[in-house]
Amino acid sequence: MKIAESKLTAQAQISVPAEVRRKLGLAPGSVLEWIEEGGAVLVRRARKYTFDDIHKALFPNGPPKYVENPRNEGVAKYVRERYGRRRARD
């Protein structure tokens, strides 16, 4: 079913017809996907994932537990001794 037509400009740009923008819920800054399926090219609104969606996919059992690395204190001590200010002698 044909919804609308667009014309390609000399700069290879197109306008998205108002009816298509309304149907897809497009606004300035929206991203479109161009997909090839069965010899046809489909245009659709790009899927958006929120930070929470990604976080839940990566950590389904909740956020990871922080584990203190015992080497961190040794590194901090070395840096303080190597690069810290030296005390003035009396």
Image (tube, rainbow, N blue to C red):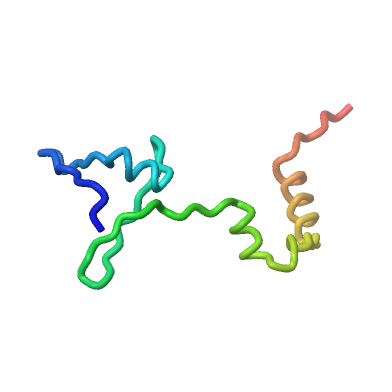
> Residue at position x 24%, y 39% from top?
15
Q: Position of residue 47 (x, y in %)?
A: 46, 55
Tell me if residue 18 comes above or below residue 23 in the rendering.
above
Image quadrant assignment for residue 63: bottom right
Q: Quadrant of residue 1?
A: bottom left
In the picture as drawn, the residue positioned furthest to the left comes out as: 10
Looking at the image, residue 15 sits to the left or right of residue 74; the answer is: left
**Viewer-nearest residue: 54 or 3:** 3
Q: Is residue 56 left or right of residue 41?
A: right
Image point (33%, 45%), residue name: 20
Measured from the top left, where is residue 19 in percent x and y?
A: 32, 42
Q: Outermost residue, front direction?
A: 1
Compared to 9, does 88 lie above or below?
A: above
Comparing 16 with 82, the one in front is: 16
* Residue 72 left/right relative to 14: right
Please report the residue visible at 76 percent of the width from the left and 50 percent of the height from the top: 76
Q: How many marks?
A: 0
Question: What residue is shown at x 41% (from left), y 37% (from top)?
Answer: 27
Q: Residue furthest right?
A: 90
Q: Residue furthest top?
A: 90
Query: Is residue 23 depicted above or below 42 in this figure?
Result: above
Front residue of 15/5: it is 5
Find residue 17 and report its horizontal and vertical position in percent.
27, 40
Quadrant including the C terminus: top right
Residue 8 in the image, given as x and y percentages of width and height = 14, 43
